[in-house]
Amino acid sequence: MKTFFENVPQIKYEGKDSKNPMAFKHYNKDEVVLGKKMSEHLKFAMSYWHTLCAGGVDMFGSATIDRNYTCKCASPLEMAKAKADAAFDFMTKLGIEYFCFHDVDIDPESENLAEFKANIEEMTDYIKGLMDKTGIKLLWGTANNFSNPRYMHGAGTSPFADAFACAAFQIRNGLDATIKLGGKGYVFWGGREGYETLLNTDMGLELDNMARLMKMAVEYGRSHGFDGDFYIEPKPKEPTKHQYDFDAATVLGFLRKYGLEKDFKLNIEANHATLAGHTFEHELTVARINDAFGSIDANQGDYLLGWDTDEFPSNVYDATKCMIQVIKAGGFTNGGLNFDAKVRRGSYTPEDIAYGYINGMDTYALGLKMAAKIIEDGRLDAMVSERYESYKSGIGAKIIAGETSLDELADYAMSLEKIDVKSGRQELIESIINNIMFS
Ligand code: XUL
Ligand code: CO
């Protein structure tokens, strides 16, 4: 029988000189980098929604990608099962060990909530069978609390309690599914948790309610055996004008205000970082230094467009800077690297999806190798450490130890004949990085 990814062969590592488009040039899963296999460092995951569901619809045009996984005459559940077969076929061919999903990605949605719940139970049974057969694992699950019209004003932050209750229903399903499939993560991405105008919005109540819903989710999850991490995935805007989970720093403030920081970590997405006016590296650093680094949604935006283009990552510099942060954070524990990325609308064949993943995985394999080279070289870390040398002795050491006062510092400043402030050496550092990467 014809299968969706029939033109995608088993993808093997052939090395950097290979010209085979259906082969990895850099991702060699068993190769050891900094004492760990590449596959363990990277923990690649497939996003079910972009890979199996997105049809290429945009504001000006309809779907370009055929998403019929079996005869169009099939029932919604038969279609969902055929889609799951295609998903596991694709992951097996690419050697991707994890996947991530929203409830509605795997499950024919129904306005009859009892039927919706029954469908997800049937589909998770089916997917569990595929997981057992292939050894592929669930990285994280989530609920799509943003597409259905009932969430037009938000879900956990909706002014309408009925919509809030529906969000709770979907989160319970999402958690049940995640627990059943052994997932170690559950994501909250607040797609419509924000506002269009403050003129009709009670921001205080909406944020309190969002926290209430998250607390209920934690209580439910923990009492039903979920021992993984809850994640918030920051994003500043789109679809709403302003989203409450604006960026990593904003989310940390929210988690701490409501006492949620023990259960929640951050899922940092590259394109969301750039939409917030930050680099991906910045958001990862904020998460890391606050012990909140959890997982990654890997993709990239377009420098000229102000929305979430979710392109497959191909920028090796960004991947390198990302992997430096991942390594410094001690690597992934429950999290991993989910390709929240889609092919362009004009790249409408199943093979294009494979090319996207192959290049995305190769980009991160290169990023990992480059990050390891930069760390092993040691020059960058040494320069950073030297830059803060003044805090290792004298008055600087007293500042760090909390053993000085404003009075003592002011008198010290007045006694200085020469103020010691050195060059930042940015240009030199950038040339050293190029030298390490391309030597
Ligand atoms: C949307 C986005 C989501 C989340 C999961 O921008 O990134 O797909 O990753 O809901
Ligand atoms: Co995402």
Image (tube, helix red, strand yellow):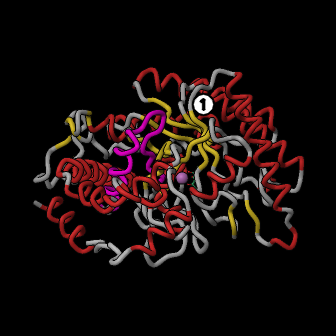
Which residue in the structure is indicated by mark 1? 178
Number of disc labels: 1
Quadrant containing the C terminus is bottom left
329 is within the stretch colored magenta: yes
Q: Is residue 73 visible?
A: no
Point out residue 306 in the picture as x, y percentages from the top left corner. Answer: 53, 75
Q: Is residue 278 visible?
A: yes
In this picture, residue 257 sits left or right of residue 153: left
In this picture, residue 420 sits left or right of residue 406: left
In this picture, residue 173 sits left or right of residue 36: right
Above or below, 359 against 69 in this view is: below
Point out residue 223 in the picture as x, y percentages from the top left corner. Answer: 71, 22
266 is within the stretch colored magenta: no
The residue positioned 78% from the left and 60% from the top of the image is 152
Point out residue 290 in the picture as x, y percentages from the top left corner. Answer: 52, 48
Q: Disc 1 residue type? A: Thr
Point out residue 42 in the picture as x, y percentages from the top left corner. Answer: 35, 41
Q: Which quadrant of the figure has residue 124?
A: top right
Which region shows up in magenta? 316-340
Above or below, 41 against 290 in this view is: above
Give whichever of 42, 125 is nearer the camera: 42
The residue positioned 54% from the left and 68% from the top of the image is 275
Give whichever of 19, 429 is nearer the camera: 429
Give whichever of 216, 291 is nearer the camera: 291
The residue positioned 74% from the left and 45% from the top of the image is 258
Determine the secondary structure under disc 1.
helix
Quadrant containing the N terminus is top left
Q: Which quadrant of the figure has residue 247?
A: bottom right
The residue positioned 60% from the left and 30% from the top of the image is 178
Q: Which quadrant of the figure has residue 32?
A: top left
In this picture, residue 62 sits left or right of residue 258: left
